[in-house]
């Protein structure tokens, strides 16, 4: 038995935002006790006074690099980084080596996570074998092995017919296809957003249209097939507009963005900063504002980090040659909390973006909620903690972040995963990982 | 410039007394107007050397200049080599065809290896934008950018400015049209700073696929009409069409390009009577520039080449501490 004592319990799924305590038993939420906490409790107590108590956060888009690129990250280090950043669950993409296009790989990830992980790991399997965009993987078998959804992230399904068939086939099982929306012909050779920043530096550009053309295609295929599609890391204004339109039309389309797309613009590439290089690229200010608007009005369903660890030497090189992506698990929550400052995003909405909606979109039962009977995945946040993000504090194996030296407000004080403490900054609570 | 080996400055004509603090020349984007003028003034005094019978001074004696070229280049590399040798530097050429680069060594490793041999100055040309900036962060010597991808070619910008000054006596207010592949041109980006900063009325012209609309934010005028660009121009600078770069066609054919964006006598007649023609070279005769015009008296293309040596001598001299030593 464990009591999370007297915090501000924010659980949008049950419509709750009030002071109270949570009782945990056998890895499940056993009870919610509103108001004053009981004076006597027979079990361990975590004092959450002055803190927020949230359903465990879920990062629905990370790269754990395991198997195959363990020097960049592995399931252990990646989940420790996740816990440290406030996440109790992550969905990891299929671009490992070998690609997660076979049940054996899915099982490997699940088993390694179960034995060594500091967070729940939900593998996303590839849509096509080898992510080559040709033949579908064995969706049903992969699902049975533990795959939660399907994506060729990083290498979108180029052939519209292949994607059409995948969506159509998946519909019968209600499987989710996640798409990295990019028209590769339009983006070919590009290394940064096509705009003044890249033009000035002579860096080949990737136009917004490379993303928008693909999103439009994906939406039309969702309409054609009735399949369920999730647009990953939306970075452009028109991308948000298209998603809004699709939702109005009642299509089964959802979308996520990443913290860097509402925090930074392509101005960050100044000085050929390879830690500002990602795909899709950082866009212009107009895009950034549109992403914020999409978050506020509910068009964007989720914030996911797109945690993409890369070793030093693939980032310490010429800009065009550098790998795409940044680590994000340890900055996603505080950067997302910066949205609260304007008052347009409430803490409850933030929990929807980081927990409720990812659980719903991925179809994970028992998560994204603090209802009685739900898994005891809990994130305890200190909303007032002001801290500097320093390279020396990073728990990921990789260091590729543009945010060192940034002052953050808000931080995960503790994380529980199935009742186990996977992260703690609280003086009287020790993590057990 | 006698006695320079003992740390004397060259006998100068009107070099403004300024402190040269720069360790690298990576691009003109962060050059102040004063610095640009100072380099030009220093180049003028270097040109004195070039008019002598013995075109060599001991200013860089004992210093090593490494020409690190990852792209084929004859004239820029030769120009730097001659500049270095006229200052008595030991010049070493390292080009990608004979280097370990072909064995897959990273730029970082190549740079560290060269740096470990303790050169004074590395002059680098590289196909990636920002490569010189990257190099400068990982070596202890000075770096001169001899062209990095589509980013900058600062010595070309300076030599173009110097050439225009020599021919026109001023830059401010004169109309300079730059025509061709603006999108991929490092020469344009450096000249936006060199010529643009000094007050030229800059016009950029090319087919729309090679002249992004955002280029208007550079402050230059942009047009897809070569006649508009050339009309009443004092200087017409033609850019080389990179024949090898046409992996995705930016225009229908060289024939069509030449018809719409090539400079011939008929179009050039729209320019001012005393207008001159420039080209960073090498020229595709008959493509961007007619053979007739390339050979004409209005062509100052070889003056550019000549200015190039003086500009590069000036920069090598300044980076090697020639000026600093006088203080």
Image: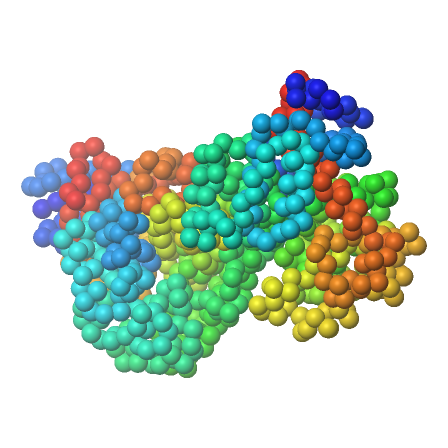
Percent position of residue B59, x then y: 66, 26
x 9%, y 46%: residue: A1
> In the image as oriented, which residue stretches furthest toward the left?
A42
**Frontmost residue, A211 versus B302:** B302
**Frontmost residue, B206 versus A224:** B206
**Is A277 placed above or below B38 here?**
below
x 59%, y 54%: residue: B72
Question: As drawn, is B2 to the left or to the right of A315?
Answer: right
Rendered-image quadrant of the C terminus of chain A: top left
Instruction: Residue A259: tell me if it is visible.
Output: no
Question: As drawn, is A159 to the left or to the right of B62?
Answer: left
Percent position of residue A23, x then y: 14, 48
x 20%, y 45%: residue: A422
**Is A417 placed above or below B250 here?**
above
Give the quadrant of residue A45.
Answer: top left
Instruction: Residue A273: tell me if it is visible.
Output: yes
Question: As drawn, is A413 to the left or to the right of A239?
Answer: left
**Frontmost residue, B132 versus A114:** B132
x 69%, y 51%: residue: B188
**Frontmost residue, A82 versus B20:** B20
**Is B204 placed above or below A430 here?**
below
Question: As drawn, is A190 to the left or to the right of B212?
Answer: left
């Amino acid at each position: 038995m464990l009591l999370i004592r007297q915090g501000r319990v924010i659980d949008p799924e049950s419509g709750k935002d009030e002071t109270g305590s949570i009782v945990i038993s056998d890895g499940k939420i056993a009870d919610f006790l509103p108001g004053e906490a009981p004076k006597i409790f027979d079990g361990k107590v975590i004092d959450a006074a002055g803190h927020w108590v949230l359903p465990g956060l879920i990062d629905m888009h990370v790269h754990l690099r395991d198997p195959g690129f363990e020097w960049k990250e592995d399931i252990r280090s990646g989940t420790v980084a996740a816990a440290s950043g406030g996440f109790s669950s992550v969905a990891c993409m299929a671009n490992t080596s070998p690609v997660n296009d076979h049940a054996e790989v899915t099982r490997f990830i699940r088993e390694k996570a179960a034995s060594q992980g500091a967070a729940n790991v939900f593998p996303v399997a590839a849509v096509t074998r080898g992510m080559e965009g040709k033949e579908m993987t064995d969706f049903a078998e992969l699902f049975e092995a533990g795959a939660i959804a399907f994506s060729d992230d990083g290498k979108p399904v180029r052939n519209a017919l292949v994607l059409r068939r995948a969506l159509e086939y998946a519909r019968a099982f209600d499987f989710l296809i996640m798409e990295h929306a990019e028209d590769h012909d339009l983006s070919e050779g590009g290394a940064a957003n096509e705009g003044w920043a890249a033009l000035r530096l002579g860096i080949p550009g990737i136009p917004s249209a490379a993303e928008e053309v693909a999103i439009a295609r994906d939406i039309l295929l969702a309409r054609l097939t009735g399949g369920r599609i999730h647009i990953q890391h939306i970075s452009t204004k028109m991308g948000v507009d298209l998603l809004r339109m699709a939702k109005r039309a009642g299509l089964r389309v959802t979308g996520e963005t990443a913290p860097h797309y509402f925090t930074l613009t392509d101005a960050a590439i100044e000085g050929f900063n390879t830690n500002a290089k990602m795909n899709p690229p950082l866009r212009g200010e107009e895009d950034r504002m549109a992403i914020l608007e999409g978050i506020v009005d509910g068009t964007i369903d989720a914030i996911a980090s797109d945690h993409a660890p890369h070793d030093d030497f693939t980032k310490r090189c010429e800009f065009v040659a550098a790998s795409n992506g940044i680590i994000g698990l340890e900055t996603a929550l505080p950067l997302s909390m910066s949205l609260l400052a304007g008052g347009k995003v409430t803490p409850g909405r933030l929990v929807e973006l980081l927990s409720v909606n990812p659980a719903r979109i991925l179809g994970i039962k028992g998560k994204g909620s603090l209802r009685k009977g739900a898994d005891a995945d809990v994130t305890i946040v200190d909303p007032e903690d002001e801290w500097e993000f320093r390279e020396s504090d990073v728990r990921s194996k990789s260091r590729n972040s543009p945010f060192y030296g940034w002052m953050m407000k808000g931080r995960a004080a503790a994380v529980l995963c199935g009742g186990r403490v996977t992260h703690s900054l609280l003086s009287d609570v020790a993590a057990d990982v | 410039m006698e006695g320079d080996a003992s740390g004397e400055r060259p006998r100068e004509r009107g070099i403004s007394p300024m402190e040269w603090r720069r360790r690298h020349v990576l691009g003109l984007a962060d050059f102040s107007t004063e610095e640009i003028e100072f380099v030009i003034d220093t180049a003028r005094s270097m040109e004195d050397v070039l008019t002598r019978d013995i075109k060599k001074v001991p200013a860089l004696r004992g210093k090593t200049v490494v020409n690190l070229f990852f792209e084929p280049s004859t004239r820029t590399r030769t120009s730097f080599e001659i500049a270095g040798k006229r200052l008595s530097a030991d010049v070493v050429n390292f080009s990608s065809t004979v280097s370990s680069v072909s064995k897959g060594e990273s730029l970082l490793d190549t740079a560290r290896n060269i740096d470990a041999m303790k050169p004074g100055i590395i002059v680098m040309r590289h196909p990636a934008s920002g490569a010189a900036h990257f190099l400068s962060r990982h070596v202890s010597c000075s770096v001169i950018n001899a062209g990095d991808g589509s980013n900058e070619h600062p010595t070309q910008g300076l030599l173009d400015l110097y050439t225009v000054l020599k021919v026109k006596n001023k830059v401010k207010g004169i109309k300079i049209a730059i025509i061709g592949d603006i999108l991929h041109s490092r020469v344009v980006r450096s000249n936006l700073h060199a010529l643009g900063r000094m007050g030229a009325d800059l016009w950029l012209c090319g087919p729309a696929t090679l002249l992004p609309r955002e280029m208007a934010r550079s402050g230059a005028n942009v047009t897809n009409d070569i006649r508009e660009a050339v009309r009443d121009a004092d200087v017409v600078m033609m850019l080389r069409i990179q024949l090898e770069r046409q992996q995705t066609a930016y225009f229908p054919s060289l024939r069509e390009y030449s018809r719409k964006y090539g400079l011939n006598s008929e179009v050039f007649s729209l320019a001012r009577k005393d207008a001159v023609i420039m080209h960073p070279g090498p020229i595709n005769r008959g493509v961007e520039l007619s053979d007739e015009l390339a050979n004409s008296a209005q062509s100052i293309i070889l003056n550019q080449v000549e200015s190039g040596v003086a500009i590069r001598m000036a920069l090598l001299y300044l980076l090697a501490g020639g000026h600093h030593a006088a203080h």
